Structure formats: structure tokens, C-alpha cells
Image (tube, rainbow, N blue to C red):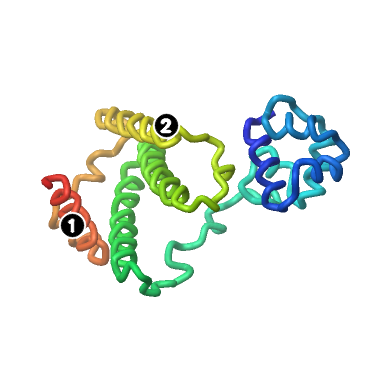
Amino acid sequence: MKTDFPRVLSLLRKEKGISQKEAAKELGVSQALLSHYEKGIRECGLEFLIRAADFYGVSADYLLGRSADPDGMTITVEDIPEPDAAKDNTVSGAGVLPIINKKIIANSLNVLFDLLAKSGSKELTKQVSGYLMAAVYRMFRIIYSFSPKNNMNTFSVPNPGALESADAYMKSCEAKARKLESDPSVKNENISVSSETIARTYPLFASSLFGLIKNCEDNMDK
């Protein structure tokens, strides 16, 4: 059975705020057997899977890790909200810095992903996206761990070693992306740009991208 199942099963019980003993009673199994299911020592049968899905009010696909939606729905492009859909630009204790940096990063990504689209390479897009997702994952996980109240069962990769694994994955994505430089499937002529063409093609985002480049290089020099 998919390795996500033990983690999801355990997480749902903890989110419900009940003990393993209480859950086992409701699910019609012994506490020892439920413990084995939650630890991935044993695989459950279809009958238990259906019973657990009904008890926790989720789909079997969610329990098995086949869907990120509790109802089992598969996300589509239309389902993904726009980055600023919430439009919450409230200045917090950190000042305006989070708002400014969020806009700089988001605007720079608009340029990057437009260039990826022009490259015509699904593989290049996959590797760049994987790298960026892993970078966000690493920093989110670091911040998430600041509060001892946060349930680490949210993550399937345990500590220690999770951040190191993410870093290795990022390096792998970078290496694979660099190898595509000479791949004939990448339309390099479509992504030939200069500062002038970037400013002309992306008038709304160019200043953010140039600011991001300068900020990074200034910090690298330090």
C-alpha cells in the first residue's frame, strides 16, 4: 500500500483529537493493529480502508495519498487560485518587507515561467519547477518547525535529513536543467533576451526581476 497511508491515517486521528485506543474502538480493530497500520508495519484490507474513510469523512483516495483533497477531487488549472486572490496586504509586525519581497518574487517568476513556456520544453519546465518547489518546501518546513505546537506528521519525510534531502533534490533538478542547454528540443532562440528586451517585453515585471538580481548579487558579494 502507498506509503502515504500510514501518515495520513495517523494525522487524521490526531486532527480529530482522539487517542489510538478510541479510534481503534470506533474502527472495529485492536489498538495494536491500528498502531501497526499507522506505523506502516502492516497493510490494511479494503474493508478497513472504507471504514476509516467513512469514520474520518474523507475519500479513500485521500487516505491513500492519491489526492490532496479530502473529498478526493483532482485539482485542475482552474482550481488553483491566483497568487493575489486573497489580496491581504496588511502590514504586520515585520513591516512592509514581506509584501515587497512577495511581489518581487512573484513578478520575477512571471518572467521566468513565460521564458519557460517560450522554450517549448516540458522537461526544462519540470526541472525548474521542481527546484523552486523544493526551495519553498525547505523554507516552509524551517518556519513550520519554529512552533512546537505544529504537528510534524504533516510531512511524510521525517527529521532529521528532510532538509538535506530537499537540498539534494534541488541540486539534481539544477543539474538536469543545465544538461538541457544543448538539447535540440529546447527552443533557445525563443528565450534569447537582454536587459532591453526584458524591459520592453515585461514592462510590469522587469523592475522586480532586476531588483531581485541586484539584491541576490549584493548578498552573494557579502
* Image-based side of 2 in relation to 140, left or right: right
Task: Give the x, y percent position of residue 217.
Answer: 15, 48
The image quadrant of residue 92 is bottom left
Q: Which one is in front, 203 or 55?
A: 55
Identity of the residue furthest to the top in this view: 41
State the residue in front, 192 or 133.
Answer: 133
What residue does disc 2 label? 165
- Within 10 Å of disc 2 (Cα), the crowding (few <14, some 14-19, many 20+) is some
> Callout 2, which amino acid?
Ser
> Which residue is at 16% across, 45% downward?
220
Write the residue at 63% across / 31% down: 3
Q: Is residue 65 left or right of residue 35?
A: left
The residue at which mark 1 appears reads as 210
Badge 1 element: helix
Front label number (1 vs 2): 2
In this rendering, the count of numbered labels is 2
Say which residue appears at 68% left-offset and 41% top-offset: 10
Say which label, 1 or 2, has the lower sequence index.
2
Residue 185: percent from left, percent from top = 33, 32
Label 2: which secondary element: helix
Q: Is residue 77 left or right of residue 89?
A: right
Distance of label 1 from label 2 (alpha carbons): 31 Å
Marks 2 and 1: in contact by CB < 8 Å?
A: no
> Looking at the picture, which amino acid does disc 1 mark?
Phe
Residue in front for this viewpoint, 147 or 111: 147
Q: Residue furthest right?
A: 28
**Which residue of the protein is positioned furthest toward the bottom in this rendering?**
90
Q: Quadrant of residue 203?
A: bottom left
Between 59 and 123, which is closer to the camera in this rendering? 59
Q: Position of residue 161 (x, y in %)?
A: 44, 31
